[in-house]
Image (cartoon, helix red, strand yellow):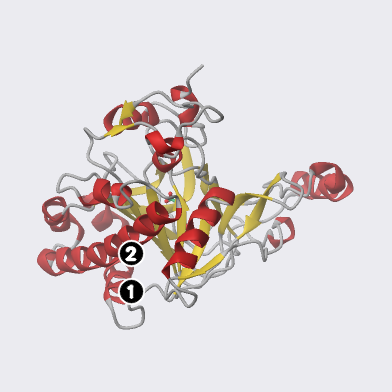
Amino acid sequence: MVVPSATTPARQETVALLLPPPSPAIPTVDMSAPRGRGALSRQVARVCAEQGFFRAVNHGVPMPAGPAARLDAATSAFFALPAHDKQRAGPPSPLGYGCRSIGFNGDVGELEYLLLHANPAAVAHRAASINTSDPSRFSSVVNEYVEAVKQLACDILDLLGEGLGLKDPRFFSKLITETDSDSLLRINHYPPSCTIHKLDHDDKCKLKRIARTKAGNGGNPTVVGGRIGFGEHSDPQILSLLRANDVDGLQVLLPDVEGKDGWVQVPADSSAFFVNVGDLLQALTNGLLVSVRHRVIATACRPRLSTIYFAAPPLHARISALPEMVTAGTPRRYRSFTWAEYKKAMYSLRLSHSRLELFHVD
Ligand code: AKG
């Protein structure tokens, strides 16, 4: 089977014209708690309720010479291999190596990726097809990174538990530290794209129309002529921790000052983690925290490498709104379900589907 290479150049020119401006609206959370733990936990709870997304700085995961740098070196070496070598780790089942195709329902993006189960035994099993010369070194680099980001995810979830005033503030972090937790690690590699896009006559006409109608478009960017790196979606798990090199591309759908949603460009910051609330956290908090929709639009002249840790509970974990989140004024919004049930529903749907709607109490 011939799998297309994500690095094959095609059409030429940039689409920067179509991007929304970088926004100052991305909240930043200083994890070193300069104003004390109480203030930090309230801030984390507030941004997760208002935006579902924030940039974590001073997070304690060493960057330049630590596990993140070692993982980036190992995964960059993998993506630099010839296509037929990479295909030994695919096709994605959904785990493994994938190129362009995302999921099982026809979604595509301009990227290649590795999707790994974060459990050390699963990493060891997969490593043999990813790094044939030294699989055990590859496993240890992945496991070391997973341990570091899992710790950060637990810290953030504990802060959330405290900020929300939960009876058991460690409730969320316990879900992701179970030995059979279903957390994943995804490494995405987006090829350079400024050499890929040439605007044809139709695109240029569309651009003119967009410029004329922008005021009536709510200020939202239009992806006409742009390349979808990773299509619009929310993450299904509890919490995602994303780290990327210094190449832009990530956009999030945030409420603007007038309360309307708009796509916002997230300026790259290779020293930070970008944290987003997943669908399960929205369900556990009865909709108080919001699972943010996001996407990647590839426009840069350099490759983007991003690594996302998706913190998830075990498959059998039952997800229902915590009692303290259900009140007379905020009745239960979602019926109870297991993570396995939710995953099954997710795999039957397109990437952009608002899956939680399927579990809404009528
Ligand atoms: C995902 O893999 O779920 C993403 O949202 C990708 C984000 C990125 O690669 O920057």
Look at 24% across and 57% down and name the residue there. 85
* Residue with the most extreme bottom position: 65
User: If the image is split into quadrants, where does the N terminus sit?
Assistant: top left
Number of the label disc, if any, that sits on residue 152: 2
Image coordinates of residue 288 in percent, x first then y, are 51, 41
- Element under label 1? loop
Indicate the amino acid at tag 2.
Leu
Image coordinates of residue 168 in percent, x first then y, are 30, 48
Look at 49% across and 44% down and name the residue there. 291
Image coordinates of residue 102 in percent, x first then y, are 41, 41
Image coordinates of residue 118 in percent, x first then y, are 22, 53
Indicate the amino acid at tag 1.
Val
Residue 115 is at least partly visible in this image: no
Look at 60% across and 64% down and name the residue there. 194
Number of the label disc, if any, that sits on residue 61: 1
Occupied quadrant, residue 142:
bottom left
Occupied quadrant, residue 159:
bottom left
Viewed as shown, does residue 106 lie left or right of 95? Answer: right
Do callouts 2 and 1 mark residues in contact (Cβ within 8 Å)? yes
Q: Residues within 10 Å of mark 1 (few under 14, many from 20)?
A: some
Look at 49% across and 66% down and name the residue there. 39
In space, the residues marked 2 and 1 are separated at their CA atoms by 8 Å
Q: Earlier in the sequence, mark 2 or mark 1?
A: 1
